[in-house]
Image (cartoon, grey):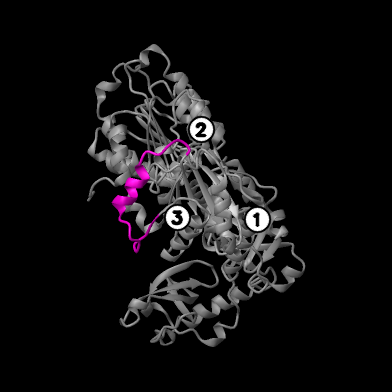
Amino acid sequence: KFLGPTFTESYCWPPVARGCDVVAISYQGNDPFLYIAPVLTFLQLGSCYKSLPNRSGPLALILCPGWKKAQLVFELLKTYERCSRQLHPMLIILGQNKEEARSVKIRGCEVIVTTPYSLLRLFEHHSLLFCRLCHLVLDEIEVLFSDATEQVFTVLDCYKKAIVTEEWVYSPHQIIAVGTRWNKHIAHLIKEFMNNPYIVITAMEEAAICGNVQQVVRSCMNNERTAVLLRILDFNHSNLQKVLIFTNSVNEAEMVHKALKSNSIFSLKIHKESEFNFKYILEQWTKKYSSGTRVVLVLTDDCMQSLGITDATCVIHFSFPSPRVFGQRLHSMSDNFCKVIKDSSVDQECTKAMSVILITENSACHALWILRYLQYAEAEIPPELHDFTAKMVEAEEDKKFSRPLCTCLKMFGICKNRTMCPDRHQINLQIDVPQNIPDKIIQAPGCVTILPLHIVNATNYFGRIVDKQKDQYTVLAEDINEYFKKPSNKISVKSVEKLAFYGLCEKTFYHRVQVVEISPKEEDNVFFNVKIKYIDEGRTSQVQSYQLLQLPAKFQCLPPQAVEFIVCRVKPIDNEIEWNPKVTHYINHKIKGKPHEAKIVHTLGNTAWVDPVVGIELLSDLKMSVNEYNIRSEILSMGLGTDNPEHIMQLQKL
């Protein structure tokens, strides 16, 4: 079903398949297909590897930024390996338990997919891991360098040392780095570890960072832009020889051109309504002028493609650019982007091109994006822009005020990507007032008995708080099941309403459920799917409408019993933001449906933070219970979790 390579793949595949070093930065840079097909193709050439030492060890190593991406890459390898010789790929994700790393067997495996942290744990016990390694792939290079810089360079050093021996002269050695953004460490990667690499960048704003384009920001009021522009052009700078001034309308272009003319600055102008054609403008632009003569062209964005200019030395964004237009404007200077050259310290310092951005009070819609870009490009940012964007961030957060509280914030105390996260990161007293948690527990939080029934991940569960004296839900559940034993009481619902409560039989047990979603396309059908929530357990499911039963009002009086529980002070290792399924599966098997003693240390909305949570075993003969395990300790002992001492403190700050 493959239709053919994408634009970026068309540039990447040939050099990768020839065994060359490649760096690829594109908007699709997180797609493993940028390298999987050509790497598998190269691995078919068995004769290339004949001079390698006859030991066990992989030919290819794919480093991913986390277990989830590694799993995706591994699945793709398994799929496309069917078309090639047997490579016996392995997915290796290791915790901090040394015994686990020691027991890994890699004999016969030719491709390993892993993370930097897991690889170094493996290397401690498998010192010959790099002895046959020919292809090193760095997937999502910008994430690897931001989250695991030291570990990635350690891996690169090990690889570099392994291939300097004589036996490697006739063997391939290749490094492939793919990602969505340029990173300052990539230049070091190219100069120290790569050999004459192909650098493919299809995202122009990233190419500008790689090309060391100087980004200058000028903040002013909207009505002061012309005066600021004239001051910029008055400055005699070598980068101001061939200047493009971008505007977003014909009127603006005319106004700027008139202002330049009245200040004795020679300039050309082009827009869809101007009298000059593109040929004339290009003739003037490319004409040989005497040294020191400046060429200024005022234009609208819709003329860029027709002109095809790539040799400008300066771009002035008179009108604030959108992210899409910004890269296209910078491309007008691509001939003057500095090249990343091996063993050259001169090129890194050169700045042959300059981009000047005018920020005004009307730049709000894209100010956040441009600030992130400028920070990434390590540009000098005026304090006014920081203040402006801080207000913007605040305004964006206010828009999320009715959204649920961010899951990462709840589970770990921080959210790594607040600007992109769709959920709330501040307290809303109306939403966050405690729900489904008995008043006596809120007033005097302490030890309670909890029953985890739906396990979301290793530290996040839904379940019930069980009253030790007389549990109201236990009584209600018995009454509901007794009621529905009579066939005459099992009345199917004719008209399903959103948010209404119904009964539902699952195997032999009857639950209270609430309809949370009805598909609009299916409302006219006799039977249709509805999304329901088990209000006393917290899980959701899709069921057929005919399965819902009328629930008498007397069974709806007791409020929903499901509470969200979060185990405190523990988080995944290796800067991961999601729990490894291995630890989630283990905890699910250990705790689901079993009573636990827990101390509630914090409550917000329908969420209770618990620390500690202890599994208890009831000894009926002795009429007593014993503590069997501590959930946090169990996670830590697996080597897949680490201490998170500031968890509750971060929540209390909010």
Residue in front for this viewpoint, 93 or 484: 93
**558 left or right, relative to 156:** right
Residue that appears at 35% across and 42% down: 286
Identify the amino acid type marked 2: Cys
Quarter of the C terminus within the rendering: bottom right
Give percent across and percent down for residue 500: 49, 82
Asked if the residues shown at circle 3 and circle 2 are in contact, with their CB atoms under 8 angstroms apart, the answer is: no
Crowd around label 1: few <14 · some 14–19 · many ≥20 (10 Å): few
The answer to if 275 sits in the magenta stretch is: yes
Are discs 1 and 2 less than 8 Å apart at CB? no
Residue 294 painted magenta: no
Q: Please, is residue 62 above or below residue 469 in the view?
A: above
Q: Nearer the viewer, residue 19 or 506?
A: 19
Amino acid under disc 1: Glu
- List the residue tagged with mark 1: 384
Q: Which residue is mark 3?
A: 246
